[in-house]
Image (cartoon, rainbow, N blue to C red):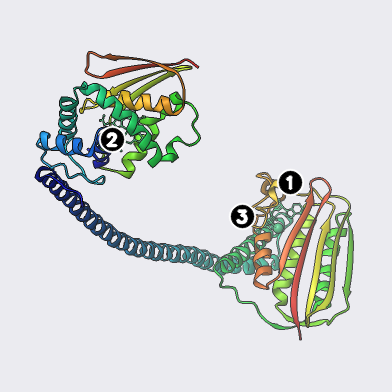
Amino acid sequence: MKGMVFTEFLGMVADRFSENMVDDIIEDSDLPSGGAYTSVGLYDHSEIVKLVESLSHRTGAPAPDLVKAFGHHLFGRLQTMHPEFVCGIDDALDFLESVDKVIHVEVMKLYPDAMLPRFETSREGNRLQMIYRSPRGMEDLAQGLIEGCMEHFSQVVRMERHKRPDGSTEFNLERLQ
Amino acid sequence: MIDLTDDQISRLERRLARERSAREQAERLLEQKSRELYLANQNLLLVKDDLERQVELRTAELQSLLGSTTNMARARGDFLATMSHEIRTPLNGLLGLSELLSLTTLDDEQSQYVKALRISATSLRQLLDNVLDISKLEADRLELESRDMDLAEEFEYAALTYRPLIEGRGLRFLFDLDIKAAHMVKGDSLRLRQILSNLLSNANKFTSRGEIALACRTSLVEGRVEALITVRDTGIGIPTDKLDTLFQSFAQAEASTSRRYGGTGLGLAICRNLVEAMQGSIRVDSKPGEGTTFELRLHFTPA
Ligand code: HEM
Ligand SMILES: Nc1ncnc2c1ncn2[C@@H]1O[C@H](COP(=O)(O)OP(=O)(O)OP(=O)(O)O)[C@@H](O)[C@H]1O
Ligand SMILES: [Mg+2]
């Protein structure tokens, strides 16, 4: 997993809690990298899972809620780092539809070692269905990113999320205004 | 001065160690990426060299292919030239013998046969001469002579030859010679006659009423004699879509032309090649059913 995900996560923890909380969850987690992350490095996916668990343990907040919150935060950061993907688009559903077909495709060219999820989309007017598939199972992060995206475009979108029998996760989105 | 507890100090020390290790890691990564970039660049240079070499190789291959194609065209020309030459020798024998035969006492039927024999042999020799010329011309092996010649005389000669043939068929023949500049120029009179005769014989062949006009006007351009020559007729004309291929060897306007008018489609190809060898130009203008005009522009050095 790209170091940027870790540095962003720890940055969020420092902002919302404290620098000391960052030290504490790193020390609680017993990480192979020792928690010395650089945004351009690559680290094992299990480290982010451990960090989230430690944060949940120390704060008492459920891990899924923390990951979703991180999704909101991450979306804002991604969109400031790569404004080219957002520019020209004024609708959350249009944007989300382009994540798999355009954005992550470009991301792969930029970072050939990135590990990206797959989104299968089908669009019908105000409705968009996204089926999330990834060996990393980060559907909470996906949800947080989707919510961050809706906030960014200031649109009201109703979201339903189901686990599918094959292990993938289905997001059914409907734009209300 | 802020007082820190031991615990706080050791926390800061660990944080510092972590940051330092992250920085070292980032620097190592940077080093590695620069090395990769450098190697990729070296590779690109190699690829570029390789591409350049390949382009050179292909160019050389194409050049040698082009060379062998030119050689093939030459070989074909040589073959045609040799063949026509070889056939011409016995054919001349045949012509000579038929001439001798016609001098002996023959009955009416026999002298008809001998006459037909001579006509056939003469047109066969004409055809061979054309094949010989075009093969030399296309292989760039025809050498033009540069002797003193009288332009006015050449045109008068052509008019003299064709007037009876044309008027004999009930057509009018117009001849307009306007030679103000020098009469005497340097050139190949045999080849000039050949050009005029090809154009006039075509005009005569493809015109059944009206007129045929031969005109030549000369002027002095930058010390050289420029001759503007036109051969105009009121004959069958040439379809517009055939005008482009007219000057290619063995090209005739219609598939039926050879059957109806004879010929093999070499005349104009020879004309064009000769005109080009003289660094001149030839063009045609025609309307089906109305007539055809050939216009040539030739340059000569004054003698
Ligand atoms: C400007 C927009 C975006 C950019 C530049 C971007 C780029 C990235 C990058 C660099 C990663 C990390 C890959 C790795 O760790 O190797 C990633 C992961 C991810 N992205 Fe995006 N992304 C964008 C938008 C989105 C959106 C809107 C969604 C949600 C629909 C999304 C869903 C995910 C998920 C769920 C992951 C985690 C990896 C996984 O689940 O397998 N991304 N993205
Ligand atoms: N004055 C003309 N009027 C109409 N058609 C012409 C005229 N001159 C040439 N053509 C057309 O162009 C063709 C090519 O002319 P060219 O002199 O090359 O061949 P040819 O007269 O058919 O045969 P060859 O000259 O070899 O005996 C002719 O067959 C004829 O269709
Ligand atoms: Mg002819």
Mark 3 vs mark 1: give the one in front.
1
Give the image location of residue B112, x and y in percent.
72, 56
Instruction: In the rendered structure, find residue B163 and report the number of the disc placed on it.
Output: none
The one nearer the camera, B77 or B260, is B77
The residue positioned 25% from the left and 33% from the top of the image is: A17
Would you name the residue on which mark 2 appears?
A12
Mark 1 neighbour class, 10 Å CA radius: few under 14, some 14 to 19, many 20 or more? few
Instruction: Describe residue B242's horizontal placement relative to residue A49 as left or right.
Output: right
Where, quadrant-wise, is the C terminus of chain B in this rendering? bottom right
Q: CA distance from mark 3 to mark 1?
A: 17 Å
Quarter residue B203 falls in: bottom right
Q: CA distance from mark 2 to mark 1?
A: 85 Å
The residue positioned 10% from the left and 46% from the top of the image is: B10
Q: CA distance from mark 3 to mark 2?
A: 87 Å
Camera sees residue A133: no
The one nearer the camera, B113 or B60, is B60
Check mark 1 vs ligand 2: CB closer than 8 Å? yes or no: no
Give the image location of residue B72, x and y in percent.
45, 63
Is the residue B252 above or below the residue B136 in the image? above
Instruction: In the rendered structure, find residue B239 and report the number of the disc placed on it.
Output: 1
The disc labelled 2 sits on which kind of residue? Met
